[in-house]
Structure formats: structure tokens, C-alpha cells
Image (spheres, rainbow, N blue to C red):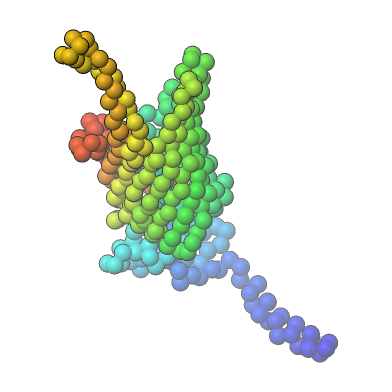
Amino acid sequence: MRALILAFFLTCTPIFLFSQEDTTSIASKELVRVIQTDKTELIGRILKQDEREITFETADGRKIIIPQYVVKEIIPIKKNDFNAKGVFIGEDMFATRYFITTNGLPIKKGEHYVQWNLFGPDFQFALSDRFGVGVMTSWFATPLIASAKYSFEINDKNHFAVGALIGTSSWAAFSGLNIGGALPFATYSHGSRKANIALTGGYGAVWFDGFTGGRGLTSIAGMVKVGQKISLVFDSFIVLPGAARDQTSINWVYDPNTGNSVPVTTTIQVRNPGFALLIPGIRWHLEEGRAFQFGFAGALTNGNVFPLPIPMLQWYRRIN
């Protein structure tokens, strides 16, 4: 037994010594993105690196020396980060969001971001690779809406998530405007951070001054990154028609037999109409961790379609 242990040790020792022989030289056949502190990017392979510098071979075969102090981040590149023509596309860091809705993809842990809107900010924090929380509000800090989402990975291309939004009129409640709402939802998405489509369903409930009500909500959305700087985005927000209800009215009708007006009760079934908001747009990736998004919304209700005069303008920025 001791002979076997000794033989194993003697066999492994040269391997161990060889692995310790040069800790400053790292060669890699894998493609990487090197993001520098001045926000420039390089795509290629690391030939060698130590604590002072990196010897880097670019995609066009040039060899350059990069000081370590100018390197902000090194990101491995996957094969599917290229399109069919071999042009680098990469992932969309903000692929979990569209204009209004989200999808089943999780925010990567630590990739917190803020979405600036014309009406106010929306902060999102990734507490783990599956769980994220957020808070959104207007520039007047009312309403104040908290959000949470937990994602499940079915496989590489399919994800499912459950979450909720809950809001209040915050400080405005002290002036008598006490309004609240909640929106639990579930969403399924197919695809990746480069291209995906999502189907979401939920129930929106509101309450104020003793009144409570709610409607079913759904959404179909998707995005595709068509270039290193451009993503096409489509979002929708669909309020389903309300449940049918009886509406009774009393009309006074003249009776020629009696010469008097008599009440006539009429009951009809009515329901609140559905409403759909459709938003196609473009997301422009300004640099790593920053993007600008704009779109034009159209509304559909009672069979009529009309455009909204104010465009959707949003700014994304990573906050870590």
C-alpha cells in the first residue's frame, strides 16, 4: 500500500512542479473581450500575461502589449456571440427588459442597473443569479412601486419567472390620495441574451377609498441584437376585457291608456373594453454598461388604433 502511495506521489510531483514553473505566462486559444478604462474594446486572444501587462493578439493578427492598470474587465466570448458572417454581436446586457415588461431571464448577479424614463427612474438590483428586486417612481416620488422577480432555468434556451409589483401613493396619501395596487405575474421566455421572446400573464389590482378592482393583464414581447451596437425591441401591454356584468336602468315612458308616465326597467350586459399598448423600438448600446432606447407607442381599444404623440425614451446605465 505504501508503495502505491509513493508511486502516485512520484508520478504527480513532476506535473505539480511543471504547473508551478511559470505562473506569469498564460496562453489561451479562447477569444475574449478586453474592456479598457477609457471604454475602448479589443477582441482577440491572450498570449501571455503577468501582474504588469498582457500580450494580446487581436482578431486581425496584430500583437500588442496592454498594461494591466488600463484593463477594466476581461470577458470570454462564446461561439454564438458571432453572427453567420463571423461578425461579433455579443450579448445584450439589458436583455431581461423591454420597454415596460420583463422576461424569464435572470439579471446576472451584481449587474445592477437603472432605467431612466421621462417620468422617473427604475432601479433594479440582482441579489443572486436568480433573484432580483427593484424600485421605481416618478420625479415627484409618487407613486412608489417595489418589484421582485425569481427566475428558473428550464434549459439553456427556456426560462420561467414569477414576480410581483406592489405600489402606493407614498407621501401623497397624507393629502388624502391613498391609492394602492399590486400586480403578481408569471413569464415564460425562449431564447438567449442575444435574441428572445417572452409571454407574460398577471392580474392587476387597485384599491382606493374603499373601492377595489382588478383586470387580467398579458404581454408578448421580444428583442434581438442585430449588431454590436443595435438591438431591436418590441413590447406590449394588454389589459383584458372586464367580466360581463348586468347594468340596470329605469326610464319613464308615457302610457296612453292611463295618461301617466310609468317606469320601465331595462337590464343589459356590459363589460369594460380591453386595451392594448404596442411599442416597437430600437436600443442603441453606447458603450459597455450604457444604452439608449427609443420607441413609438400605439394604442388599440374598441377596434380603433391610434398613435401616442409622446415617444418612449429610456436610458440604461449599469450602476456597479
State whether residue 33 is above or below residue 313.
below
**Of the pair 21 and 248, the residue shown nearer to us:** 248
Count the marks: how many? Answer: 0
User: Outermost residue, front direction?
Assistant: 257
Q: Quadrant of residue 100?
A: top left
State whether residue 315 is above or below residue 74.
above
How far across and down, in percent of the image, does residue 144 sit?
A: 48, 28
Residue 151 appears left or right of 290: right
User: Outermost residue, top direction?
Assistant: 259
Residue 173 appears left or right of 62: right
**Of the pair 22 and 131, the residue shown nearer to us:** 131
Residue at coordinates 29% horizontally, 67% vertically from top-left? Answer: 84
Residue at coordinates 57% horizontally, 58% vertically from top-left? Answer: 51
Residue at coordinates 32% horizontally, 43% vertically from top-left? Answer: 236
How far across and down, in percent of the image, does residue 187 sit?
A: 43, 50
Is residue 112 in view?
Answer: no
**Of the pair 67 and 112, the residue shown nearer to us:** 112
Quadrant of image for the N terminus: bottom right
State whether residue 173 is above or below residue 230.
above
Is residue 171 in view?
Answer: yes
User: Outermost residue, left direction?
Assistant: 256
Residue 148 appears left or right of 12: left
How far across and down, in percent of the image, does residue 291 sit?
A: 36, 43
Residue at coordinates 18% horizontally, 9% vertically from top-left? Answer: 259
How far across and down, in percent of the image, does residue 207 sit?
A: 47, 27
Q: In which quarter of the image is residue 21?
A: bottom right
